[in-house]
Image (spheres, coloured by chain):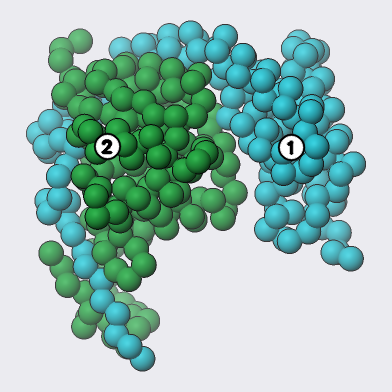
Amino acid sequence: MSKSKFDDLKALIVEDNAHMRTLLRGLLGVIGIRDIAEAGNGQAGIGVLRERKCDLVLSDLMMQPMDGIDFTQAVRNSDHSPNPFVPIIMITGHTEKSRVEAARDAGVTEFLAKPVTAHNLFSRIAEIVERPRAFVRCEGYFGPDRRRRQIEDYAGPWRRKEDFQDMDVC
Amino acid sequence: MEKKSAQLIQPDGYPQMMSRQDAAHAMRVLRSAQTSVKAQVVMESFVPAARTGMMAQVAALEAADDIAEISLAAHEIRGLAEPAGLRAAGRITDVLCRYLDETQVQGRAADKAVVQLHVSAILRATHAEDEGRANCDAIVSQLNQLVGRKLAERIA
C-alpha cells in the first residue's frame, strides 16, 4: 500500500488498561498512524500534550486520578492547552446516558462504545477526516458543535426571540 | 432576559488533521479491503490479551463487595468480552449493565438477587465456553424478561 496520509500524523492514547492500549495502537497502525504516545490517565495525557503535538486523541472515560471527562475539559478549556481543537474520540464501556451527555458536554469530538471494533473506530476517524465540525464557544462550553445535523437551508420555525441577533460567525 | 451569544468557528478557522486533498486519499485507505484484512489480523492477535484482561475483571466481579464495584467490573467486561471471543459472557453482561444503568436513571436501588443472578451467569459463561454459547440465547432472553419486569415494578 502506498504511503498513507495518516503516516504523518501523531496520536495519543489515554487509557489505563495496557491491553486496550495495545489494541488501539495496533488498529491505528493498520491505517498508517505509528507515531503514537501513550498515557495511563488523563493527567499524564495532559503532560504528553504539553510536550508534543498531537493530531488525534483516543481517550478512555474511567481513569484515575483524572478521568476522560476532566481530561477533555482540560484540553478544551485550559489556558495552557497547546491545541484546544484536537479531535478527541472517547472510547468506553460506560455508555449510560449521563456519561455520554457528560462526554458530549465536556467537548469530545466522537464517542465510541466498547467493545472496540476496527470498523467502528475507523468510522469515527472517517467522520473527523471527512466531516470536521465547527467549534462553538459560549458560556459554559467550548468544543465541537453539539448539533449533529446541520440543515443549512432551514427556514423555521424559530424558537427564540433572540434568534438572528446573537450568532457571530467566524 | 439577558442575551447570550455564541461564537462559531468553522473548520477552516482552526488546525485540521489533514488537508481536504489528503482527506480524500485517507478515506480510500480507511475503506480499502487491505485495511480490513490487516485490522482483522490485529483483532485476532488481541484475543489472548483480551482474555487476560477479561479474566482479571471477572475475578473483580466475583470479589466485588457492592453494586458500585460490580457495575465498574461489569462495564469493563462488556468492553472486553467480544474481543476475547467470549460473546456469551458479553451478552449477559450487557443485560446487567443496562439494568444497573437504568436503575441509576430511575433513582432506585438495584435488586441484589437480580444482580447476583447475572453475576453467576457471567461466571458460568466465562468458564464454560461451548456450553455457554449453546445456552446463551435462552439465558439472555430470560434475563432480559426478568430485568424488564423489575424495572417496571413501582418504586416502593
Q: Residue at x 43, y 17 (%)?
A: A22
Estimate the x, y position of residue B46 in percent, counting from the top left: 50, 13
Question: Chain B drawn in what color?
Answer: cyan
Q: Residue at x 23, y 33 (%)?
A: A51
Q: Residues within 10 Å of mark 2 (few under 14, many from 20)?
A: some
What amino acid is labelled 1 in the image? Answer: Ile
Estimate the x, y position of residue B152 in percent, counting from the top left: 82, 58
Q: Is residue A45 left or right of residue B93?
A: left
> Viewer-proximal residue, A156 or A114?
A114
Estimate the x, y position of residue B106 in percent, counting from the top left: 72, 61
Q: Is residue A45 left or right of residue B127?
A: left
Per the image, the residue denoted by label 2 is A49
Give the Cα distance between marks 1 and 2: 33 Å
Estimate the x, y position of residue B20 in percent, counting from the top left: 12, 38
Q: Residue at x 31, y 36 (%)?
A: A47
Per the image, the residue denoted by label 1 is B70
Quadrant location, the C terminus of chain A: bottom left
Figure chain in green: A
Chain name for mark 1: B
User: Is residue A120 among the parts visible in the rendering?
Assistant: no
User: Is residue B126 among the parts visible in the rendering?
Assistant: yes
What amino acid is labelled 2 in the image? Answer: Leu
Chain name for mark 2: A
Q: Is residue B142 left or right of residue A111?
A: right
